């Protein structure tokens, strides 16, 4: 897998991603402590609102930003987003009102909504070989998992010698380092086919591209399945460990670590699997696995009282959800790369980024509210029902005879590509 790092441009971009992720992880820990300083016992509601603001920014702004992004050089867009995030991070230690936290979080996530889809659209052009691109996707998934384990440990170590306010300086340094690494390489010039209409028409173009290809509609359905399993883990782990199993607070990181370990294991094994199996052959079984875990062992765990067997079952269930989620998430870029012509990929990546996060915007509050009001079993079964809906829809939508060289979607007829774009699309289809 690491052989893909021989490509200098990708190596610098991957390093930029990793450093920015570590900085974001430090900010997450520091923000929790800042919220407690400002709001005290209401810190949970502050963080919950901040998480909702994050998802709203991702869902609402990514397509709108992408509609204008073609007017800017890629390097300027990526570096500008990093600089905005660095400026927000260095400002956070000075806030003393909850509304200021919400405003700065919105600005931070708006910049991330610009950076992430643009970054995703660059990688398939930097690594045109499908084998290299598959490895890059797995490395990216691995980086996210390692960040979730490494950043809290790093923050805990740093807090023994510095105050949490200074963690925001580490976040700023991470974003500045990311910007410098992006500046250090030449990025391919994007191929963009102009879209007629106003900003809303351009923003919706990516969604129409996804909806126009069966395998990408199936991907959106599977995004709902992944969000259902992930929401149970990220929202209710603390409840399972502390209130349901009556275990120590120190066991919470172990439970979350099991989810990350499952995801990392799948990310490491997936490139070799995808060399022999089409995406449909691994992603649909992963959807069934999430559904089965939510409606089977984890439902039993939620319903039964305390028992010695429950802790190993929780760890195994969390690891299974993490592995299945990675098997669905990691090949998503391959599907978009294979289905959408190069000049239209940036719109498609922005739309997929936005629509996948809209699933989390649904499942996060569902997991929290149902878990608190109706109990863990009800929350588990409701999320299992959502996962079942997503998986069944994906199975019905995604053709069993999905071909590897399907002609890329060029979008609806009322948004025709110019002659040069049509020529590029035809060449892409032949490849």
Image (spheres, grey):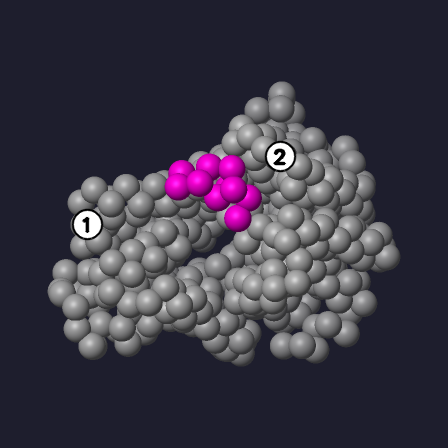
**Left or right placement of residue 303 versus residue 328 in this view:** left
The secondary structure making up most of the magenta span is helix
Q: Position of residue 99 (x, y in %)?
A: 54, 28
**What residue did someone put label 2 on?**
95
User: Could you tell which of marks 1 and 2 lies nearer the N-terminus?
Assistant: 2
Residue shown at 73% from the left, 58% from the top = 16
Q: Is residue 30 above or below residue 289?
A: above
Q: Residue 307 colored magenta?
A: no
Q: Residues within 10 Å of mark 1 (few under 14, many from 20)?
A: some
Q: Position of residue 263 (x, y in %)?
A: 46, 68
Q: Locate the C terminus by quadrant.
A: bottom right
Q: Which residues are magenta?
A: 33-42
Residue shown at 37% from the left, 69% from the top = 251
Q: Position of residue 97 (x, y in %)?
A: 55, 30
**What residue did someone put label 1 on?**
375
Q: Is residue 58 above or below residue 128?
A: above
Residue shown at 51% from the left, 48% from the top = 32
Residue shown at 70% from the left, 78% from the top = 3
Q: Is residue 208 visible?
A: no
Q: Is residue 45 above or below residue 260?
A: above
In the foreground, 421 or 308: 308
Q: CA distance from mark 1 to mark 2?
A: 36 Å
In the foreground, 347 or 396: 347
């Amino acid at each position: 897998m690491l052989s893909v790092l021989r490509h200098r441009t990708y190596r610098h971009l991957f390093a930029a991603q990793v450093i920015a992720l570590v900085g974001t992880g430090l900010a997450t820990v520091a923000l929790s402590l800042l919220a407690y300083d400002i709001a005290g016992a209401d810190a949970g509601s502050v963080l919950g609102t901040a998480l909702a603001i994050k998802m709203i920014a991702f869902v609402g702004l990514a397509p709108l930003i992408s509609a204008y992004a073609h007017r800017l050089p890629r390097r300027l867009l990526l570096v500008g987003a990093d600089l905005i995030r660095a400026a927000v991070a260095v400002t956070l230690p000075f806030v003393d009102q909850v509304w200021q936290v919400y405003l700065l979080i919105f600005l931070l996530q708006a910049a991330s909504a610009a950076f992430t889809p643009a970054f995703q659209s660059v990688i398939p052009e930097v690594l045109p070989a499908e084998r290299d691109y598959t490895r890059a996707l797995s490395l990216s998934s691995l980086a996210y998992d390692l960040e979730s384990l490494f950043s809290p440990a790093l923050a805990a170590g740093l807090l023994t010698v510095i105050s949490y306010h200074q963690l925001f300086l580490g976040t700023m340094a991470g974003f500045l380092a990311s910007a410098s690494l992006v500046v250090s390489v030449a990025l391919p010039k994007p191929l963009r086919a102009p879209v007629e209409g106003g900003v809303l028409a351009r923003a919706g173009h990516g969604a129409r591209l996804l909806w126009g290809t069966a395998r990408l509609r199936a991907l959106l359905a599977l995004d709902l399945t992944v969000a259902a399993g992930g929401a149970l883990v990220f929202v209710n782990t603390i409840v399972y460990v502390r209130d349901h199993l009556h275990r120590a607070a120190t066991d919470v990181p172990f439970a979350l670590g099991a989810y990350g370990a499952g995801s990392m294991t799948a990310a490491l094994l997936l490139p070799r699997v995808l060399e022999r199996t089409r995406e449909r052959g691994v992603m649909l079984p992963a959807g069934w696995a999430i559904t089965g875990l939510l409606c089977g062992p984890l439902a039993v765990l939620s319903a039964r009282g305390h028992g010695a067997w429950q802790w190993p079952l929780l760890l195994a269930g969390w690891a299974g959800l993490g592995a299945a989620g990675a098997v669905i998430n990691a090949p998503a870029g391959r599907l978009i790369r294979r289905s959408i012509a190069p000049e239209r990929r940036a719109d498609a990546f922005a739309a997929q980024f936005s629509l996948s996060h809209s699933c989390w915007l649904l499942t996060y509050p569902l997991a929290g509210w149902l878990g608190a009001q109706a109990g863990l079993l009800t929350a588990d079964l409701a999320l299992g029902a959502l996962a079942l809906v997503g998986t069944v829809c994906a199975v019905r939508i995604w053709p069993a005879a999905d071909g590897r060289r399907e002609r890329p979607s060029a979008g609806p007829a009322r948004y025709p590509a110019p002659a040069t774009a049509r020529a590029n699309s035809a060449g892409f289809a032949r490849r």
